[in-house]
Image: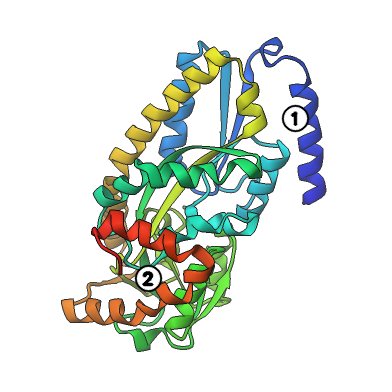
Amino acid sequence: MRRLIMAAASIAALVLAGPARAQSPIVIKFSHVVAPNTPKGQAALKFKELAEKYTDGKVKVEVYPNSQLYKDKEELEALQLGAVQMLAPSNSKFGPIGVREFEVFDLPYILPDLKTLRKVTDGPLGAKLLKLLEPKGMTGLAYWDNGFKQMSANRKLVSPADYKGLKIRIQSSKVLEAQFRTLGSIPQVMAFSEVYQALQTGVVDGQENTWSNIYTQKMHEVQKYITNSNHGYIGYVVVVNKKFWDGLPADLRAECDKAMKEATAYGNSQSAQENEDALAEIKKTGKSEIITLTAEQDGAMRRALEPVYKDVASRVGQSLIDEFLKETRGATN
Ligand code: LMR
């Protein structure tokens, strides 16, 4: 696969060799791993529509959904090598390229709601995190929402003890690994595109994801129970290859920036509804039982997962966790 990415990257380098203005149109390949009818899928299409409109077609955005071009880890390599120009990986996926700080978003129950999230992403902390991407050859352009995660398995997941011994698919985040180890599960990192089949064949017993991702990947068809746990968050960082972005003619970059701002506002205003709709669709199929936790059960889960904060402090950085909590809770833990 790496050879293929390298080949695509050298073609991209040849194309970019001349002044960007010389080719017409300039193409932005936007690769992502989810379905078009998800918060990320919709925001990507909105960016395409607006960027093409504002640049009078001088910039063309090709959106490749559903891991059509690359899976999770590959797409980040492809971006760094210039084989694609834009991505929106989840916060949880930056660890393997050496930017572990985004894993702070993975801490269980760290975000009470999306309004609080906005305080982080739209404030100085959000901007500081984006800066960490530059030495990796990427420019961080925006934060896009998906929403809150739910737990699913073929076993009812109600109390912490229910997680014991289950093999659970996770994204490539050490915080998520710690979360499931704390519950006595066996976490397994796996690309998003492989989750459905892994659940179907029993390679893993369960997973955590948002309603929109569960529904569009049909995970509810191969999971008997989904717990409405809202225990964590999935959101994205829109990243662009830095060399490509800096090399764009300034006027076109400004128009693309404007398109990105508007696509972000649009996507983030729709995401909660899209997840609500997906939940309603899942309910309609009757294929999974949706479990609602009582206040006590929810409290027991929260208490069981508290040690994760200490476990991952050295990886994510205690001061970053404190800074994050200051924004979200107004006090440190
Ligand atoms: C996952 O891997 O579960 C998600 O990050 C997929 C996505 O991009 O929403």
Q: Could you tell me which residue is drawn at 29 percent across and 76 percent down? A: 302
Q: Position of residue 319 (x, y in %)?
A: 43, 61
Indicate the position of residue 145 as horizontal and vertical percent values. 37, 46
Q: Nearer the viewer, residue 177 or 189?
A: 177
Beta carbon of the mark 1 residue lies under 8 A of ligand 1: no
Along the viewing direction, whichever of 171 and 41 lies nearer the viewer: 171
Q: Is residue 277 left or right of residue 314?
A: left
Hey, what amino acid is under mark 2?
Answer: Met
Q: Quadrant of residue 296?
A: bottom left
Mark nearest the camera among 1 and 2 is 1
- Compared with 317, 66 (above or below) is above
Q: Is residue 32 above or below residue 325?
A: above
Whole-percent x, y for residue 174 in the image: 54, 69
Q: Which residue corresponds to mark 2?
A: 151
Q: Secondary structure at mark 2?
A: strand
Q: What residue is pinned by disc 1?
A: 12
What residue is shown at x 76% (from left), y 44% (from top)? 5
